[in-house]
Amino acid sequence: MQIPLRTLSDVETYVRNREWCDARLSACPLHPTGGCSFARHGSYARVTPQGLRIARWYCPEGRQTFSLLPDFLAARLSGLLAAIEDSITVASSAKSMEAAADALRGPDVTLPGAVRWLRRRIRGVQAALAYVAPEMVIGAPASRSMPEIARADGRVLLGLRRSLSPQILNSIPAPLGFKPTSGTGWPRNGIGQHEMGPDRDIASHYGPLVCGSRV
Ligand SMILES: [Zn+2]
């Protein structure tokens, strides 16, 4: 299960300060009144951005891990929400999906692979935004438009991630929210599965504890 780690840091600051070490989850989300053996369970790395780790807890009784995902990070796709937003901006002004995918992914990725990569991002964001209504954004005056309300540092997705409650994020598809997007256009042949990473993987391999005594 993913839980937002509220932070105003950008990715560089988060990595430099090893903010995953100081992340806190005060109670088990499955047993908020206690009574289980809920405990910190180290951290795991994302392949990208390099050096980034995510704090993790585990409830043995509920057999569930809990990952604290920093606000700037995409859920179930590699990279940052801002980078996904940039990809969609490129796609919206390109001649074709193929031209946008080629420009974004470069010569090292086959064109069909690049197009799948881009389509996953576009579908994910479209599906997520279809769930979001202005009244969901905390403190939003009803008369203001969504982009106005949601923008943080010029970023719509980042603004929404920071504004929406954990409960609402759990009901919104990834990469904005945390809901698995199966059935909304994920490839069936397994291509791209590696991108979904250990966030979804309750039984993922548990990496070394890298925060020393603070783990
Ligand atoms: Zn528990």
Image (cartoon, rainbow, N blue to C red):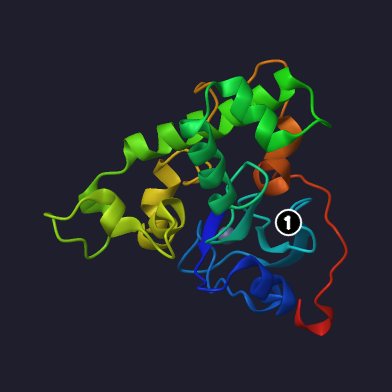
In-front residue for pair 145/211: 145
Q: Please tell me which residue lies in front, 100 or 52.
A: 100
Identify residue type, mark 1. Answer: Pro
Write the residue at 79% across / 50% down.
47
x, y (%) of residue 53?
Answer: 74, 63
Name the residue at the bottom extreme: 213
Q: Find numbered disc 1 in the image and state the secondary structure of the residue it sits on.
A: loop
The x, y position of residue 29, in whole percent, is 50, 60
Q: Residue at x 79, y 64 (%)?
A: 51
**Nearer the observer, 153 or 38:** 153
The answer to whether one can see residue 1 in this image is no
The CB of the residue at mark 1 lies under 8 Å from ligand 1: no
Residue with the most extreme front position = 95
Q: Quadrant of ligand 1?
A: bottom right
Q: Quadrant of the C terminus?
A: bottom right
The residue indicated by pointer 1 is 49
